[in-house]
Image (spheres, rainbow, N blue to C red):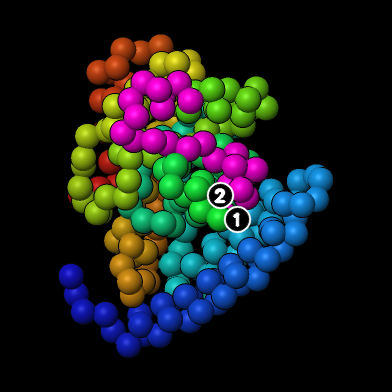
Amino acid sequence: MNRAGPGEVLRSLVFYAVFYGMTGVLALLVTVQLALPGRGVVHGVHIWTRLHRWCVTHILGIAVRIEGMPPDGPVLVALKHESFFEAIDLPNLLTYPGVFAKIELLQLPLWGRAARSYGLIGVERDQGARALRAMVKAARPLVAENRPLAIFPEGTRVPHGTHPPLMSGFAGVYSLLSLAVVPVAVDSGATYRRRWKRRGTITVRFGERIPAGLPRAEIEAQVHAAINALNP
């Protein structure tokens, strides 16, 4: 990896100061909103994600290019996961998505309550069929609200250019929810994953919709190929 230049270091430090400083302010706002009726938490989360996108483009100098058509309604959106960028940016990419996320995030004080209120679904990777049933049960009300569901089928962040197999839980969720899948390729690791962020372009490519009901081997092969379309 090339050594970071002074400009990259300076932009990254400003980004960390502005984004995480404002995150602290918004966390206080969400604390108040959690005690009030209505959709205040949802609005707070959307302000946070828009702030992040603004900081990425205007401070870090990273352009975000969207290719393809983001889906509407209940569908399983399977994304490549190379950095925190796409995890934070999901409400910008999709309309009010439910999100499958590791259970540890939902156990954090305050943040966990806000995450559950927004629609995050806890993923317990080592609990097998019991965890799968719990995930599907939590997802069904979101599907009934016509919300898209976002999932990272590789299970965790992976370095740019790598193509690990999909986690087994993805096929289970796909089968039990009987939803079509929209695969999404993302190449954020080349610019955003580094400590010192690099100028460039993050491409988010929405693939063709894959119908529900395919055999496990077929759905995994199609999704694996599509989410890795931007990886060398």
**Quick one: label 2, few (<14), some, or many (20+) residues within 10 Å?**
some
* Residue 160 image point, x, y percent: 25, 54
Q: Is residue 220 highlighted in magenta?
A: no
Q: Secondary structure at mark 1?
A: loop
Residue 22, quarter of picture: bottom right
**Which residue lies at the image location 56% right of the left edge and 55% below the top edge?**
109
Q: Which residues are magenta?
A: 111-134
Residue 212, quarter of picture: top left
Say which residue label 1 marks: 110
On residue 112, the disc is: 2
The reply to whether the C-beta atoms of the residues labelled 2 and 1 are less than 8 Å apart is yes
Amino acid type at mark 1 = Leu
Q: Is residue 70 visible to the viewer in this orientation of the structure?
A: no
Point out the residue furthest to the left here: 1
Q: Secondary structure at mark 2?
A: helix
Amino acid type at mark 2 = Gly
